[in-house]
Amino acid sequence: MKVKLSKNFRCTGMVLTGVFAILLFALQGCSKSTPACDSGKTIKTVVNIVSQDFKNDLAAIVGVGGPGMELTDEEWKSIRAGMVIDLENIREHSFDEAECKRKCAANLMIVSGGSKELIPVTYISEINKDTGELKVTLSGLEEYKKSKVAPPMLPE
């Protein structure tokens, strides 16, 4: 038994298939969802950026003494163990689904040696569309460091 389809039915089917394909493409957006501003993965990435930045600054200060005065990994681990770096008052400013980006703001909390500092920062959290990797770009830390009168002195 053969079923004969009308031309109108075939045209409607083709149009519906095309619309469905376009909807799937449009709804796909980011292949992997961009983590929220307050997600553990995003916060951990921001803390790692800040920690690495502090390590580089301290290594530069220690390295001023000349060769053999570099900061060892063990020395950094010991210094870092006495610090708490975290984010407070996290908020999302915008989300661009087409670009897979979130613009966020927070207070960077640094506790070290009994003192606590809050530094206002912004960061952009985005997913690389090709690799699915999370990338975070942090702003505000450099401005804070420039506003400081002088770097802390190291004991001799």
Image (cartoon, rainbow, N blue to C red):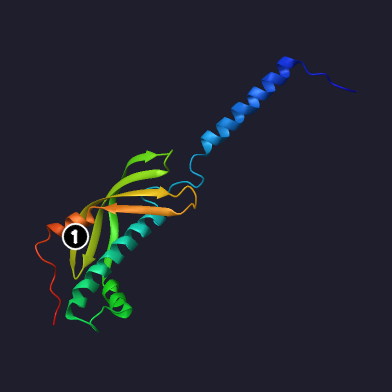
Q: Is residue 68 above or below residue 129?
A: below
Corner quadrant of residue 22: top right
Quadrant holding the N terminus: top right
The structure residue drawn at horizontal position 41% and vertical position 56%, both measured from the top left corner, is 41
Q: Residue furthest bottom?
A: 68
Q: Residue 126: x percent and y percent?
A: 40, 48
Give the image location of residue 82, x and y in percent: 26, 72
Say which quarter of the image contains residue 20: top right
At label 1, the amino acid type is: Glu
4 lies above or below 55: above
Residue at screen point 20% across, 81% down: 66
**Whole-percent x, y for residue 81 in the image:** 30, 73
Q: In what element is the residue under mark 1?
A: strand
Foreground of the two, 24 or 91: 24
Q: Residue 94 versus residue 71: which sits nearer the camera?
A: 71
Q: Return the residue at label 1.
A: 117
List the single residue furthest toward the front. Answer: 67
